[in-house]
Each structure stands twice: as structure tokens, then as C-alpha cells.
Image (spheres, coloured by chain):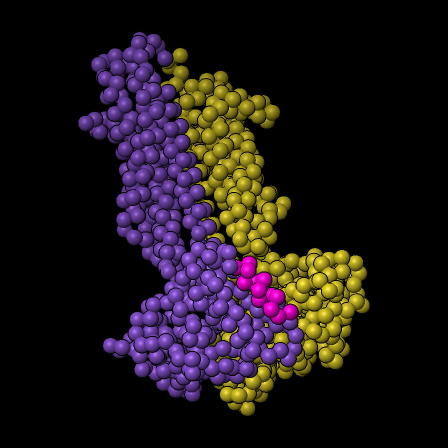
Chain colours: A purple, B yellow
Amino acid sequence: MEIGPIWRAMWQSKGGYLLIGLQIAVTMAIMVNAFAIMQERASKMGRPSGIDEANTFALASVAFKPDLDYQSLIREDLEMLRNTPGVINAVVTNSFPLRQGGWSEGLHREPGVGKSVSSSAIYFVDEHGLETFGMNLVDGENFTPAQVAWDSDSDDFWPATVIITQALAEDLFPDHEGSYVGNTFWFNDDNPANIVGVVERLQAPWPTWTGVERSMLVPLIRENEFSRYVIRTEPGRRDELMPQIEEMLSASNKERIIRSVETAADARKLAYLGDSSMISILTFVIGLLTAITGLGIVGLASFSVARRKRQIGIRRALGATKTAIVRYFMIENFIVSSIGIVTGAILAVALNIFMVQAFALTPLAWYVIPIAMVILWTVGQVAVAGPARRASNISPAIATRSS
Amino acid sequence: MFRYYLKLGTLSIRANPILSALMVAAIAIGIGACMTIMTVRHVMSGNPIEHKNDQLYHVQVDNWNPDDPYEDPDGAPVQVTYLDAKALFDAGRAFRQTTSFKTSRVIQPEGADARPFQEESRATTADFFTMFDVPFLYGSGWDRSADETLEQVIVLSRELNEKLFGGENSVGRTLMINDETFRVTGVVDTWNPVPKYYDVNNNPFEDPAQLFLPFSVAIAGNYDNSGNTSCWKPIPDGTGREGFLASECIWIQMWVELQNESAKQDYMTFLNAYVEEQKLIGRFPRPLNNHLRNPDEWMRYNEVVDDDVDVLLGLAVLFLVVCLLNTIGLLLAKAMRSAKNTSLRRALGASKAELFKQHVIEAGMIGVAGGLFGIVMTWFGLRGIENLYADYDFIQHLVRMDWSMVMLAVALAVVSALGAALYPTWRTCNITPASYLRLQ
């Protein structure tokens, strides 16, 4: 191989090669970090919420006449909803996963107002909550109807039984082995909660929260001017039932309005809008960046060929094959790319360390670096191929002309 | 000479059309990426009440859990309790003061077929409108006396007035809200502060309230807070709404207007004395931790600008660096190619300074072209962002380019191009004419 002479020739006009190497290095740094961010966001978006998202929708009932009997309104609504053909089950609750608004509580292992040991999202439901959300109960049992309480004012009433997620159980009792059912924790200074069941998964309403897997079901119905109903339909019937049910509830009582009709899928889209957009933007940026760097290589290589026309002609006249000329430019590009890529890998890691500290991103996975390396090597070789072929077509006769 | 160099530059650009286009495109794309993100950041980090930044202060007092700060390590709560809102408001020690919270109301329009609908509302006090310079289309806010006498008055947004009264002057007209009658005292003109600085706790990037009504009326009527409520101390069982109002739960935004530095100091002294006094009756178990933050400080404290925007800005700047390295490389190649020409000019007597001018002018032309196309790219970039976030109603307010951003784009492009031209130009000026002239 003619690496030696190529290297010495490059050294003669190192400025230009240095620039393209630097450009490849910065491209590499951006590409690696963009990949790392995209991967982080994609894995965040891939987490299941724990509910039957495809067949679930929610709506809110807002009463505006004073002195309405909220309890009978909620009872009537629930009965109507549960008896609608195509509805698997329905529940009145304060929120649902991915909704980005809800209720959270600090939890204690002992009674008293101390520093809380854990925190959890709260979903107020009745005994139909488990089936409506479509959760997987891994231990213990569902609430009995008798355990469900009604709460008419905003005091701090807490039922004594709860169903919690596996993640919350592990966070609350890290040293505990065996079943969590029967364990007790405290909401406030004097409100004990006894665990009657454990579900595999149910996300909190806030996907950005670090404790997103910690949530619990509390058997309580709050009698309030505002009630949110979550409705689970048979597969495929959601879109047909949504307007029907909205109309049915609107017509059943004129002293309230029905609003915030949204599917769990819409909620997911909105909750992860920032992440999905970030992925789109970064994909676009990487594409554009690769194109610019590729075009830059094409431009520089073309110049280099044009400038060395005579030299190439002489080589051809002295017996160099076309392949040898192509190989020359390919190797030259490979050397520049390699220097750029290795420098870029170092830059990428440095940038990642900085971003992890400044923006609390997750550190990049090692394999992102070789992937980016292969991409950039390929781009370089493809970009230089055209000018190299043109160089190989230079006629040896050019050597006989002066200048 | 300048015009002659412009002509030379044009000729040179025409002689290498593909290369020149590539350079202009690289600068344009780099500038476009940078300016798109910078524009969004510029809007998000703006301060719509800049002119009163040294007079308005958000009030923070630390009533939180002695064992567990509101925010580690010693952050004070970002809202206040009803107890403190009422006590501080009633004390009236500031030039102006307002307490407010977010609430949802159901409006019942007149007419048999008109359907009631819900609107985001703000329960607040008379001073809100003067403190925040809210512009009025008709009428004005309510009098301070209305706050005291629990008068059922409202201020409508321009949009809501359009919907309810067809846009005419509705001052004095009445409206049914949650089965109670309210009288309109004013209609706000178009007012959409970005960020919504008066309440950054409940989403700084959303439309402002459509309806304003007295805080005292909302409290008496038990209106629900539709913003955030945070509690640390349990409310005694069975105490209901009374218990909630007397609790340590925070849910109210309080702002004061203080006309100068000494008024601010006086108010701080007053706040400290208030907390000390409350400590005597067993409240405020934490160390004294009161804050008066102006709108700038308040928005920064609450990190109104999303981290993602900063990450993207960083990447966009690096992107511009790549585009510039690209341009430097191409300019250098071009300079080397025209080395003969340059040598000839040198041999015929052009000084290094003249050559420098000639090449910088040529680079400047490429920079200006890149900047102009960069503005076009920015426009496309912003439309792209708008499309991506189409499900987010407020996005249209974040993707607006103003003149300062346009000027910045051009300046950035010219500076970038000139910066990129320095090294190639320097190399050109240092060519030894003899080495290139020999063959001729």
C-alpha cells in the first residue's frame, strides 16, 4: 500500500486536510450525542402505562348548578356507562396515566409528620378501577364494594385499604421479602393504609416524574362538582362509542357540562410530544449534517483533483492504473476520516459528560460510537468516490502539456 | 476600489457557481438551524413586563415542613397559603398587591339553545390589572372596594367578549356564571404575555385567563383551585373547606408592587416581622426564608425555559461550527486554486492589504447571501417546529420571529463568513508569487 507517500503528500498541504478532519470530528460529536438523546427518548416513550390504552377514553363532568346531589349524579352516570353495550367497565377517578395532572402524596413508614420515605400518585377509584384500567393484579385481591368510601368535602379523609404498584411496594419496603399484602404505611400523621393488593404496573400521570412507576389505587369517590370518568370499551369500539357516550351524558342531566373528552392514545401523544419532536428534530439534524459534511468532502476532493491534474497525468503516463488513482484518493480520504472520527469520538464523550452534568441526561451507550464511526467512514468513502473516478479518467496525455 | 472588488467578487463567485452555492447553502443551513432554536429560546426566555421589572415582586414565605424542605436544599415554597395571602393582602403594606389563583367557571349564555361552557378563569384582586399593565378595550378593572364588599363583577377577555356579546362594549351588562349573576366592568384588549409570568407555577406557556373575577368572591363561593395545590401538614379530619383555608397548603400566587429599593427593603422587614410573629403561634417551623423576586428572577428561579431548548441550542451552535469549517475548507481550496491569479496581482504591485480587502469583500458577499438565505431557512425551521408541536395549542406564540432576530441572523452570517474567510485570506496573502509564476 502507498500509505507512506500519501501521508507525506498530505502533510505538504495539511491546512485543508486538518479542516476537513475537524469538520468530521465535530460532526461525529454531534451525531453521537444526538443518537444518545434519541435513544433515551425512544426508550422513555416505549414504557407501557399499565392501562389498556388502545380501548380507553376519558371525559369530565362539570356541574354548575349549586346544591346538586353529586353522589346520586355519579351513581346514575356510572350505572348508565356500565350498562352501555360495548363498554367493558367504567370508573370515576381523579386522573389516569399520561394525563400530566393528578394528585401525589408523601408516604411514611411510621405515623407522624416526618420526612416522607416515598411518594406516590393517587388514583381514587371504586372496585371497578382494576378492570377499567386493565391492570394485572399480581398479589392480594381487589377492593370489596364495602371498602369503597364516599367523601363529600375537602377534608383529609383516607380509607384504610389500598392497592399499590410493585414499584411502590419495593420503594416503600426495600428490605422486605415475600408478599407485601398486609403491610401498612401512613399517609399523614394518623392515616394508616393497609396494602390489600399489588399490581404489576400502573404509571403515575406524569411521564417526566422520576417516580413514574409509583402509584396506588385508593377506594374513595370524591363528591365534587368535578368528576372524571374513565371508560374502557371492547376492542375496536372506542371511536364509535366516544361521541355516543358524550351525547348520552350531556342529555341525561342539563345541570352539568361534559368536557375534556380524550382518548388515552391522545393523552400519550401529548404527554410525549416533547420527546417525539426531539427525536424528529435530531433525525433531521443528523441527516442534514451528514449531507453537508458529505458535500464538503466532495467539494474538497474535486478541488484536489483539479489541482493535481497534471500530477495524476504524469502518474498515469508512468504506468499507474486507473484503480491505483482511485485507490489513492480513497486511502487519502480514509486517513483524514479516521483522524477526524477518532478525534470526534473523544469530543463526543467529552460533550456527553458535559451534557449529562448540565442537563441530567443519561450517559451514552458505548455502541453508539462504533455505529457513528461506520456511518461517517461510509459517507466519506461514498463522497470521495465520484471525484476519484473523475481523477482516474484523466488522460495520461495531459502530462505532455505544459501547465 | 470597493466597487471594483465587489465586481471581482461577483466574477469569482460566477466562475465557481457550484462551489459558491455550496458555501452559501452551508452558511444558510447553519444559520437557519441556530436561529430557529435561538428564536424559540428568545421568546421563551422573554420578559413581557421588562419595564416594571424593578417594581414587581413575587412573594415567598417558608411555611414548609421542618424536616423536609419544599425543595432541596432550602428552597422556599413557590406559592402561598390562604392564611398568608389574606394576612399580607389585608396588611396592605405594598404600594399595590394582588393575590390570585386559577379556577374554572361555567358560563351560561342567554338563550334557550345556548350551551353552557367552561372557561379558564383567574380569581384575583383589583390591583392585578394596574400592576401588570393589562390593556383594556372597554371599561377597566374593578375598584378596590369591590374586593372588600364581595361585589360580583368580572373582566372578560377580548375573545370571550367576542363570543358572548359579539365584540360590542359590554361594560355594565350581566352574565350568568355557575348560576350566579355577574356584572362586566371591563374587557381586556388582546393580551397574551409570553411567558405567562404572573403564574409560572401552572404552565407558563398557555393562554391567559379568559375571565377575571374577585378573589374574595371566589373564596366565599368555595371556587375550586384548578392550578397546583401542595400540602405537607395534614388537615384535621372533618374540618372541610374551613380546615383547608386554615391549612398549610399552598395554592395562591402573590405579587406586590414596590416603587423603589427602600420600599422593597421595608417590605422585606415587614415580611420578616410577620413570619416571626406567626412563629409565636406555632406556624413557620423552618428558619426565616422569605424572598421577593422580580419577574426576571422569578422566571429564572422556576426554570421556565425547558432544558431541551438549551440542549438543542448547543447542538445547533456546533452545527453552525461544522457548516463554517466546511466553508473555510472550501474557501481555502478556492484560494489555492486561484493562487496563480493572486500571484500575478502581487507581481503587478498589489499590496498584501489590498489583496486582503479583495478577498474579505468576496467572503462578505457570500456571508450576506448566506445570511439572507439563512433567514429563509429559519422561517422554514420555525414552520417545521410549529408542525411538529401542532397538538400544542400555544406553539404559534413561540415560533414568531421579530426584527431583532432577523438582524441577528444577518449579523451572525456576516461575522461567520468573515471569520471563515480569515484563514484562507491570510494564506492567500502569504503566497510567494515567484513559486506560482515560474511555469507561466
| Residue B140 visible, this angle | no
- Residue A279 position within the rendered picture, expressed as x and y whole percent measured from the top left: 42, 49
**Can you say whether B40 is above or below B71 in the image?**
above
The verdict on residue A247 being magenta is: yes
State the residue in front, B386 or A295.
B386
In the rendered structure, the answer to whether residue A17 lies left or right of residue B267 reads: left
User: What is the residue that sits farthest to the left in this orientation?
Assistant: A1
The residue at 59%/85% (across/down) is: B242
State the residue in front, B28 or A160.
A160
Instruction: Please provide the residue range marked out in magenta.
Output: A242-254
- Residue A205 position within the rendered picture, expressed as x and y whole percent measured from the top left: 45, 66
The residue at 27%/21% (across/down) is: A325
User: What is the residue that sits farthest to the bottom in this orientation?
Assistant: B281
The verdict on residue B21 being magenta is: no
Name the image quarter holding residue B146.
bottom right
**Majority secondary structure of the magenta segment?**
helix
Q: Could you tell me which quadrant the N terminus of chain A lies in?
A: top left
The residue at 53%/88% (across/down) is: B238
The residue at 51%/75% (across/down) is: B230
**Can you say whether A403 is above or below B381 in the image?**
above
State the residue in front, B232 or B46.
B232
- Residue A317 position within the rendered picture, expressed as x and y whole percent measured from the top left: 25, 12
In the rendered structure, the answer to whether residue B47 lies left or right of residue A238 reads: right
**Can you say whether B24 is above or below A184 in the image?**
above
**Can you say whether B337 is above or below B119 in the image?**
above
- Residue B189 position within the rendered picture, expressed as x and y whole percent measured from the top left: 72, 58
The mark total stands at 0
Q: Could you tell me which quadrant the C terminus of chain A lies in?
A: top left
| Residue B327 visible, this angle | yes
